[in-house]
Amino acid sequence: MQYMLIFCEGMDQFATRNDPDKAPAYWGAWMAYVGALNQAGIVLSGNGLQEPATATIVRVRDGVRHVQDGPHPDTKEQLGGYFVIEVPDLDQALEWAARSPAASYGTVEVRPVLPPPAQ
Amino acid sequence: VTPPPDSAHRAAERAVRQSYGRLLAIVAARSGDIAGCEDALAEALRAALETWPRSGIPDRPEAWLVTAARRHLGHQRRHGKVREAAQATLDVLSTAHQSTENEPIDERLKLMLVCAHPAIDPAAQAPLMLQTVLGLDAVRIAESFLTSPAAMGQRLVRAKTKIRDARIPFELPDRDQLAPRIGAVLAAIYAAYGTGWEDVLGADPRRKGLAEEAIWLGRVVVGLMPDEPEAKGLLALMLHCESRRLARRDAHGAFVPLQRQDTALWAKDMVAEAEALLAAASGKASLGRFQIEAAIQSVHAQRAVTGVVNWKALILLYDLLLRVAPTLGAMVARAAVLAEGADAQAGLAVLDALSNQTANYQPYWAARGHVLALMDRGAEAATAYRRAAGLSEDPAVRTFLLTAAGATG
């Protein structure tokens, strides 16, 4: 079963990425987690994302393109990265979600991947 | 973060859950229908949890709950919502509280044995016990077992349906059946307490949040089975672990491994109670897994008096434990103790032999890092510590392991 782990972080956490005092601990924790995921051999894909301020939002309404400086407003937490993993059941996906650094300072959403449509 | 409730509040909640568990057990034993009893008692439980902490514990707690349940069912009936089955439950409830006094065998023991029946999904046993005996809701239980509330709810419903439809008997099993069933009850309580404490580094304290409830269930079981040494062993084990709660973090919130904990911070009353339980259990001359694990924790506790860790005693106890209960956790902890107390090379050899079943087992990688560091194999130690950090849930533990990796690699 495939699950997406969606990591959401607060703005203060994004700020620690570039804080010389805190960045080593931030990246060290993520490197260790990503290492353990890879060692487990369950990763199908995944990426970290650049800061929310780099986001751009696009909408087309009535044929008109609306382009807006991102990210989506009005949320305390923003998408920071994701993994798609292959594990037997939800409980194991939750286990991996709990191990992520984001689980202890942000949130991790766990969602089953939609299976491909039957041919 | 909610502040910890004061002791009066806690005592009231305890009384609510004690009385609820007793009533549910009696009614369920007569009808076999746990879910039906829960329905009948749910509102009474909710009202009691709200009222007693403010107004104090009533003189006759079970009678209070029965009255509240009857009032609620009466209200539902007036509104045409009551099911046929609820009336039967109400009838049983009405006489139930009178029989809670002078009951020769507490029905809760039977209820726990039903929850730990081999026909019940092992993953449901501990949650079922917490729900039926203490009245905890599925959401709270799911949080602690790291599973989704919906899945936990389903699991519990399935288990209760099975008990009713398969007619799992509410009886004390025969003597030869009783021992394994009691073992299952104790294992379920220990699962509720949280795993990982056997790890000698103390590096995997999953904060499952049910520690207090599990200790409380442990006390209930010791009370129900005064002649069962393993029940005392389990309670002693949990109390030893619990006594160190304050010592596990320093003033800055950093993780402190067992051997570096300030023993002055250990809760002396819990240690004393654990030691007394262990002594009482050993009088029965029947040694089991929980007594051995409690004895291991007792050796660690002696450091508060002697100032040193008796590694020889620990090695002997782990050897004994492996004969009784060869779990992965015990094997890893024994390797770490062997490395620390006798021969690092031998400890590493044991770890190497386990490596095909430990890919995602955090305590293994923490222990491996520790043993390699003892052997001055810094780069390999750092790799193992990092892997352990990547498998850790607790940010304080993760930081501790990454710092250890930085110091060795």
Image: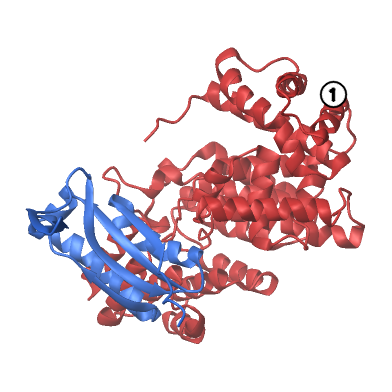
Classify mark 1: residues with Cα within 10 Å, few (<14), some (14-19) or many (20+): some
- Residue A104 is situated, as x and y percent measured from the top left of the image, at 32, 52
Identify the residue position indicated by label 1 in the image. Answer: B94
- Residue B240 is situated, as x and y percent measured from the top left of the image, at 55, 48
Name the residue rendered at 84%, 24% in the picture: B94
- Residue B229 is situated, as x and y percent measured from the top left of the image, at 76, 52
- Residue B12 is situated, as x and y percent measured from the top left of the image, at 60, 23
Residue at the right extreme, as displayed: B174
The three-letter amino acid code for the residue at tag 1 is Ser
Name the residue rendered at 39%, 51% in the picture: B261
Q: Quadrant of the N terminus of chain B?
A: top left
Residue A12 placement, left or right of B340: left
- Image hue for chain A: blue
Residue A25 visible in this rendered orientation of the protein: yes
Name the residue rendered at 30%, 46% in the picture: B253
Number of numbered markers: 1
Viewer-proximal residue, B361 or A59? A59
**Which chain is red in the rendering?**
B
Q: Quadrant of the C terminus of chain B?
A: bottom left
Viewer-proximal residue, A16 or B406? A16
Residue B67 placement, left or right of B45: right
Residue B395 visible in this rendered orientation of the protein: no
- Against A54, residue B132 (above or below) is above
